[in-house]
Image: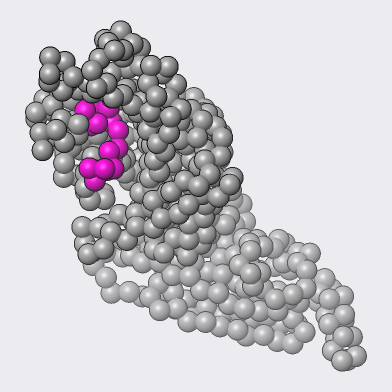
Amino acid sequence: MRSLLSLSITGALAAPAFAQEITVSVEIPRLTVAEYHRPYVALWLEKPDQSFVGNIAIWYDLKLKDNEGTKWLKDIRQWWRKSGRELTMPVDGLSSATRAPGEHRITVAPDKVPLKDLAAGEYHLVIEAAREVGGREILRVPFRWPATAAQHPQVKGEHELGRVALDIKP
Amino acid sequence: MIFKRTWLVVALCLGLPFSAQAHRSWMLPSATVLSGDDVWVTVDAAVSNDLFYFEHFPLRLANIGTPPQQPGGRGGSPATLTISAPDGSRVEPQNGNIGRYRSTFDVPLKQKGTYKLAVVNDGVLASFKEGGKVRRWRGTAEEFGKQVPPNAEDLRASFMQSRMEVFVTAGKPTTETLKTVGTGLELSPITHPNDLVAGSEARFRMVLDGKPAANLKVTVIPGGNRYRDKLGEMTFTTDAEGAFAVTWPEPGMYWMEAVVRDENSPVKEVKQRRAGYTATLEVLPQ
């Protein structure tokens, strides 16, 4: 018990110095469909009770004229309800273009929200994908913050998302 | 049959939902939760049996399109559609049209927030005997006092009040347009009406003349009943505060209705009142 306690204290104290970061690997599946559009994707953090903690990334069609790509943001339904409707897009450091099928890696920096000053505890990284003339899928990847040991949680989607994996080093 | 038909036509002319005859009046928006800058909704409005199918009559609205000849009808003055923007200002419906089975119009959503579309109507329905024959009369409360002799034989009169609403939100939901007016039967949402999610509970309050409508029966029917055998209606009874809670079984469009019959007619020559409220609510998937 004592060693666990001291470990977690060390972990918490060490966090700023050793800069724990989270690498998220997201697989966008290659789909054989008549009409394919890259999905809109939102990544955010939640507590296990599904309350919203903070955004990590929004991939949408931000190059369309007159900000027209924002018209479909509501199709990322849960994200729209929890956070999207509060924002004015695009948001610096958050929004970027949609991604092609394949594996994409993003790094969540420890000195920026939502990781900055994040209270220790259990969290879910949530990823929601919505594809024009296609489907929608939402996945939750549980992890513990800060990490006291290496964590590699992963989940696999069924139709709009492939493997989503976290790499967290203590 | 002729009796029923006449009354139905009268009810239709007033835009009143006459639940006794199973016809339902409704507006159906193309969307209720929207994002983006230049967004519109288009709305169908009709009177039908099944929800939400255009199969019987268009909902006649004074500021929408050119009303066609009503088959067997007597014309009359339809209600006006009022669209309130998030800041409380009025928005004019665009591209209005009345067809054989439905009315349609568009609403540009220039502001961010919650819009309310309302069709509010009131008037007096009366019947009395004249020269041994039953005569039916409808009109405004003012006309009633002038046109209907107070000592008419077998005079039966009722003040009819109705409100039909739809809520639509662009961006973040706001509450300015959710305020109640204080006349007739109204919905006073506790859960925002554009924040309804399948499997979650939503709470509402019914108010009559601005006061909690306690012990009132509220019916909620999911749309799409053409393709199922059971109506699937859910009934709720409001508590002492007029409140009730709905847990939505499925995503989709729902029709909500409540009716009060009392003797609180605001017209002094008329004793009875019927106050009705209907709304079309959209429930989204989790």
Residue ID at (55%, 32%): B210
Task: Write down the quadrant of residue B11 in the picture.
Answer: top left
The image quadrant that residue B12 belongs to is: top left
Q: Residue placed at 62% from the left, 78% from the top?
A: A142
The magenta span reads B10-24
Up the image or down, A145 lies above or below A57; here it is below
Q: Is residue B80 above or below residue B275?
A: above
Q: Is residue A142 magenta?
A: no
Whether A143 is drawn above or below A119: the answer is below
Question: Is residue B32 at least partly visible in the picture?
Answer: yes
Residue B211, given in percent of the width and then of the height, sits at 56, 35
Q: Is residue B131 above or below residue A91?
A: above
Task: Give residue A94's position: percent from left, percent from top.
Answer: 59, 57
Drawn side of residue B190 relative to residue A136, left or right:
right
Q: Nearer the viewer, residue B46 or A38?
A: B46
Q: Residue at horizontal 13%, vertical 26%?
A: B73
Decide if residue A63 is in sight here. no
Question: Magenta stretch containing residue B22, yes or no?
Answer: yes
User: Which residue is more in the foreground, B238 or B280?
Assistant: B238
User: Which corner quadrant of the image does residue B108 belong to?
Assistant: top left
In the image shown, does A61 or B245 lie closer to the viewer? B245
x%, y% of residue A140?
Answer: 55, 74
> Which quarter of the rendering shows the C terminus of chain A?
bottom right
Q: Position of residue A123 (x, y in %)?
A: 67, 73
Closer to us: B216 or B119 = B216
- Figure quadrant of the N terminus of chain A: bottom right
